[in-house]
Amino acid sequence: MKKINIFNKESNSPSLEASSRREFFKKTAVYSAGALSAASVISPVSAKADDPAIMNEAPWGQKLGDPVDKNLYGMPSPYEHNNIRRTHPIFSSGDYYASVAMCPIHESEGIITPNGLFFVRDHGGTAHIDPKEWRLMIHGKVKKEIVLTLEDLQRYPSETRIYFMECPANGAPEWRGPQFNNLQFMKGLMSAAAWTGVMLKTILEDVGLDKDAVWMLAEGSDNASNPRTIPVEKALDDVMVVWAQNGEALRAEQGYPVRLIVPGWEGNLNTKWLRRLEFSDKPWHSKEETSKYTMLQKSGKAIRYFWVNEVNSVITSPCPEKPWTHLKKGDMVEIEGIAWSGHGTITGVDISLDGGNNWKKASLKGLVLPKSWTRFSYVIKWDGKPLLLASRATDDFGNIQPTIDEETSAVGVESVYHRNAIVTWEINKKGECNNVQIRKHNKKA
Amino acid sequence: MKKINIFNKESNSPSLEASSRREFFKKTAVYSAGALSAASVISPVSAKADDPAIMNEAPWGQKLGDPVDKNLYGMPSPYEHNNIRRTHPIFSSGDYYASVAMCPIHESEGIITPNGLFFVRDHGGTAHIDPKEWRLMIHGKVKKEIVLTLEDLQRYPSETRIYFMECPANGAPEWRGPQFNNLQFMKGLMSAAAWTGVMLKTILEDVGLDKDAVWMLAEGSDNASNPRTIPVEKALDDVMVVWAQNGEALRAEQGYPVRLIVPGWEGNLNTKWLRRLEFSDKPWHSKEETSKYTMLQKSGKAIRYFWVNEVNSVITSPCPEKPWTHLKKGDMVEIEGIAWSGHGTITGVDISLDGGNNWKKASLKGLVLPKSWTRFSYVIKWDGKPLLLASRATDDFGNIQPTIDEETSAVGVESVYHRNAIVTWEINKKGECNNVQIRKHNKKA
């Protein structure tokens, strides 16, 4: 029989009798610092016991703080003013209307990105849509063509799923030689979130597809409209029509009120400000899949309909923005990073300290979910000597990240898309962290 | 042997040949609307095919949108201005310095709350701390007393975990009769987030505890300091010292730069603006655990050290703010809500349509994690008749939510804390949704 929980209230006073506590002591090795393995002793203490910052009462503790009604929608601490998205002229049309804003992944923690920092890629600027005026038309090779309001859409049973999103141009500056010594500009064209909406499959159960409906066109209602062709196989697999991101409505720059989520596939397929889904027996060959978002190879031919963001990883701590300059010789330190694969689930990440000659297994930590960011960790005792740090991820489809040479020999360097070669950081004696491609290029460090 | 992923690039053109596609067709029932079960046909279409909103080009599509550099830290769409935290005089000291701001859980999706909407409870207002000036002292019955800077703290290996947080006064307005016909004010003293920091156990491995260190004092550096006693058993189990929430630094109102996370236990134990952890063989009996945060029973005696937020649930859709007034008789609709337990993991949620006479099993959807919000779902065809909707959650410790009568008979109505009785919504013929306690009280609806 299940207990009625309320009865627990009567015996919920402290029950930490000496006997049970002694029992508990036996179960843990924590009660003696001497019993610990060396590896677990981090001892990061740099502050002194007579540090004025701890000896004196803090100034912020001597007065009342802000009242709660000051921020009914809260913002970051002013001390975090440096943790922002960033734009760069080489990724923009010059006016920042058709442009990108990179996510500060060097400051990210865990496997979701807060909405204020989620990377942005607009083809014609951020549209602002009155949700009452929003409509979604579903037509073409379907049994029943429909037009949905937002209220209609939200009547379907909803799902919430965590997925990364990545622009295929993430890493583009690395293809034809290094351009940045900075993780945010190198790899910040991606983010991750918990998306809430309807499985497209659920809607298609309602409308019914014709047997020869094998392609779907997704189109936005912004001025760029960004039409893209998606195979129905994918639409029926895990594609979502979403209105919420990380627990609240989508932000305008993410397609408010409704966007498509195409898990693991190129970001530009995840149509923002969605207005139309059409079904056909032929692909559309739209501008964005012929002149753009194709992958030029060394043969001079281009790969079209190249959808999946491939297995990838990068070390985020250290990185050029987060060096080891504060560490002393012999300090323990955690190497941490992000791995992801549009094919499926990350199964492992290897770490090299010597530029890829030797590899060791990192730990995956926290939630490991399909088509999501996965955090990896590797703790070392740094001897103060230079290192060449690299990570190499594998996924459950048997894919493994290539080296730069492997990637270049296969597809050349003419493309700007789908860069997933291993990234290497150089740690020098001072603890500074540099992009190895930069180092090779400049012959300085 | 693992494949080098790069080679996939050469064969990544469309491969949707007729044969494989026919094979795929056999595997899905989606291709004919007629083959579907009635339950899956939601058919929420209210818009007409000649709706001007879909026939005419949208005004926002006729011009460029905002450039990406306009919002380097993004904010919600102006159309979402109503999705905010809210305060109320009955929960404040009058000036909103020592007060609460309720989370709009009726607008929440999934199992995390965006940081801008996370509920706030301050005892002396929101402190603003320069992270360079922040220190954490760990002392008392430890082998080695230490003072940590933020940089020191962040050298420990980090963990990210999703937990709900709840003020024990959540639901307080319901104890001695209903006061709100509004979910946000009834149950909005809770939220949920992904927290990143160090397991306290990891730090205690470094400092080493004395054998008689069975209690820990956690103290903030704000003017209220909010000292609370926590058993070391819990500290060594799952308590975290965190600096990030949902992937970015803690917000000021959540204790920036560092707070304690005590999973599943009363919100006030999750000390914000943390400055001190002291270990002892005796509890402290601080003001906040003697005059406050005790539970007065009908006997006149108070329960002290009542830590765990018990098994609980509430239907969030519909709710008084999200009624069914837009539904027609015979419409399919999803009943959805949140369940949570500070003891562990939600194992099930039952739904009643008749005020608790009959119960049916809801589905749990999305991630089901310990001490986290868990979403439940139950789809019905509404016949347009009045309903009394209720949810009843169970957890993996065998706890089950009590009825109001069971809770009242066990602990009386003198307390304002730990309300976890079943909440019932009345749906009337118009589709309006009311708190049943309000209905009984007013004898109106």
Image: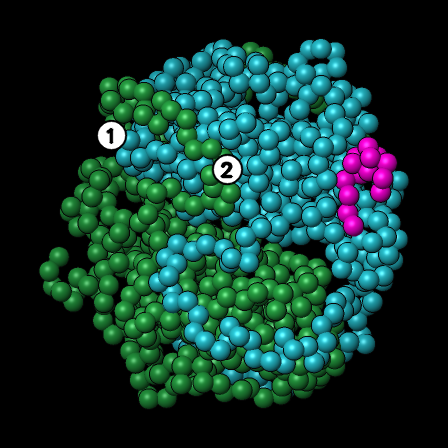
Chain colours: A green, B cyan
Name the quadrant of the C terminus of chain A. Answer: bottom left
| Mark closer to the observer (1, 2) | 2
**In this image, B386 relative to B271: left or right?**
right
- Residue B187 quadrant: top right
Q: Is residue B435 magenta?
A: yes
Residue at 31% of width from left, 35% of height from top? B130
Name the residue that disc number 2 marks: A69
Which residue is denoted by mark 1 in the rendering?
A: A46
What residue do we see at 65% from left, 19% from top?
A: B295
Where A60 falls versus A371 (above or below)?
above
Contact? badges 1 and 2 (CB < 8 Å):
no
Judge the density around disc 2: few (<14), some (14-19), many (≥20) Cα neighbours within 10 Å.
some
In which chain is the residue bearing label 1?
A: A
Q: Nearer the viewer, residue B429 or A205?
A: B429
Q: Which residues are magenta?
A: B432-445
- Is residue A42 visible in this depiction of the protein? no
Residue B404, image x, y percentages: 79, 30
Q: Nearer the viewer, residue B372 or B382?
A: B382
- x and y, in percent, of residue B38 in the image: 83, 67
Instruction: Report which quarter residue B249 is drawn in.
Output: top left
